[in-house]
């Protein structure tokens, strides 16, 4: 290695060490009551808090275990972030004032099994329980046995050695979940299910694979981001084909983008198409200020009028972003995921305000969440 390369490497190591030293000093810095923050995660195993007022890094915490997926959800009291991590195998509760781990649930709690949760966990409205869909595989000497999925219910009061207090069978292929204000659990899978977390009984709240909508295909949903949005809804994007006639020829069908949502206060479900399918978005959210406007992101940031099914404006991006997030008032729009920066945009003009660079590596498929302490 030549001298110049060695010097460059030494500077990089020194800069990284300094950055982590600052984070270590800030780890115990408590959050301020009434202040708005954004929480996000990234490699190698970091949880970051952004001061929304100044759009600057407020503090960083080290997460236990290994990174992946790093999906974070805020407890109702906005003191604890619950993070699905350690390669989809553990859920941790992190006290955001101290960075201490106050809760831990190992999803491989049955001897001989390896349990994983594919983004599928939620918090009860009172913050007393954590729900997780566990996909278990029994590891034998010469082969694996895929076992039926189950819902595991944990008590947050059990701390860092939490064990399931209840378990129930779950449908296969489920992913995102959100708990409604009445305590029921909405679960996304082949259909959207509504579940009683006390009995394990569930019903179809919104048909998806079994959507018998005349003249339309079944919707296609690919969504791994459990937004805790200011609108207090469980929402996801879908694509769908609108056929011209009873032949249902896909070559002549009109391809559309839509969104489905559950009002977590009332439990009411809603679906609506909002655009022609001309490009792919990984996430989309309705504006906190105007529910008729929806913003989608992947390779571009786009703003739509839902009722008119019309693109209002689009902005090119420096790189791909997976996840869109609003501040509580809807005055700022944050783009996260992929690299180690958050892009801040004006929702009205779609002009970029700034980039917030995070210490560490990429954010992968994490979901930035905004909350007020």
Image: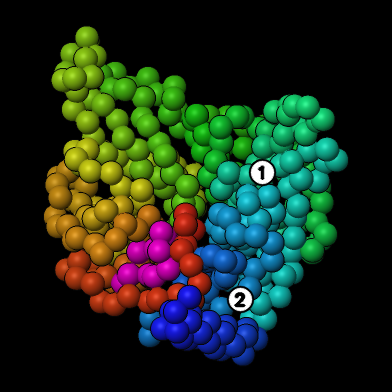
Q: What stretch is highlighted in magenta?
A: 335-344
The residue positioned 23% from the left and 43% from the top of the image is: 279
The quadrant of the rendering that contains the C terminus is bottom right
Circle 1 is placed at which residue position? 116
Q: Does the magenta stretch include residue 293?
A: no
- Which x, y percent locates residue 271? 34, 38
Q: Which residue lies most toward the right here?
A: 111
Q: Camera-side residue: 183 or 212? A: 212
The residue positioned 22% from the left and 38% from the top of the image is: 277
Numbered tag placed on residue 211 in the rendering: none
Q: Camera-side residue: 255 or 206? A: 255
Residue 286 can be seen in this image: no
Q: Camera-side residue: 287 or 102? A: 102
The residue positioned 80% from the left and 56% from the top of the image is: 162
Colouring rule applied to residues: rainbow
Gap in angstroms between the C-alphas marked 1 and 2: 24 Å
Numbered tag placed on residue 61 in the rendering: 2
325 on left or right of 309: right
Secondary structure, mark 2, is strand
86 on left or right of 319: right
The image quarter in which residue 347 lies: bottom left
The image quarter in which residue 312 lies: bottom left
- Which x, y percent locates residue 135? 67, 37
């Amino acid at each position: 290695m030549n001298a110049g390369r060695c010097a460059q490497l030494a500077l990089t190591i020194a800069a990284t060490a300094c950055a982590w030293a600052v984070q270590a000093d800030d780890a115990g810095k408590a959050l301020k009551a009434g202040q708005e923050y954004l929480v996000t995660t990234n490699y190698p195993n970091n949880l970051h808090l952004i001061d929304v007022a100044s759009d600057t890094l407020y503090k960083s915490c080290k997460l236990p275990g290994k990174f992946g997926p790093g999906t974070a959800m805020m407890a109702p009291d906005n003191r604890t972030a619950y993070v699905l991590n350690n390669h989809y195998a553990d859920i941790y509760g992190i006290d955001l004032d101290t960075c201490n781990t106050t809760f831990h649930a190992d999803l491989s709690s049955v001897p001989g099994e390896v349990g994983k949760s594919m983004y599928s966990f939620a918090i009860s409205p009172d913050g007393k329980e954590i729900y997780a869909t566990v996909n278990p595989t029994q590891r034998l000497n010469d082969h694996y046995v895929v076992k039926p999925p189950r819902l595991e219910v944990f008590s947050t009061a059990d701390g860092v050695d939490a064990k399931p207090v209840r378990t129930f069978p779950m449908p296969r292929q489920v992913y995102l979940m959100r708990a409604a204000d009445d305590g029921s659990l909405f679960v996304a899978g082949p259909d959207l299910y509504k579940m009683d977390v006390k009995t394990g009984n569930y019903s179809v709240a919104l048909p998806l694979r079994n959507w018998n909508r005349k003249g339309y295909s079944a919707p296609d949903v690919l969504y791994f981001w459990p937004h805790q949005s200011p609108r207090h809804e469980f929402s996801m994007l879908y694509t769908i084909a609108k056929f011209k006639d009873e032949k249902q020829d896909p070559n002549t069908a009109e391809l559309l983008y839509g969104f489905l949502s559950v009002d977590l206060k009332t439990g009411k479900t809603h679906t609506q198409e909002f655009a022609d399918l001309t490009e792919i978005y990984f996430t989309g959210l309705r504006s906190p200020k105007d529910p008729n406007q929806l913003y989608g992101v992947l390779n571009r940031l786009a703003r739509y009028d839902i009722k008119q099914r019309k693109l209002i404006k689009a902005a090119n991006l420096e790189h791909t972003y997976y996840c869109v997030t609003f501040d509580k008032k809807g005055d700022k729009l944050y783009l996260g995921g992929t690299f180690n920066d958050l892009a801040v945009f004006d929702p009205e003009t779609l002009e970029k305000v700034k980039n917030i660079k995070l210490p560490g590596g990429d954010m992968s498929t994490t979901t930035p969440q905004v909350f007020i302490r």
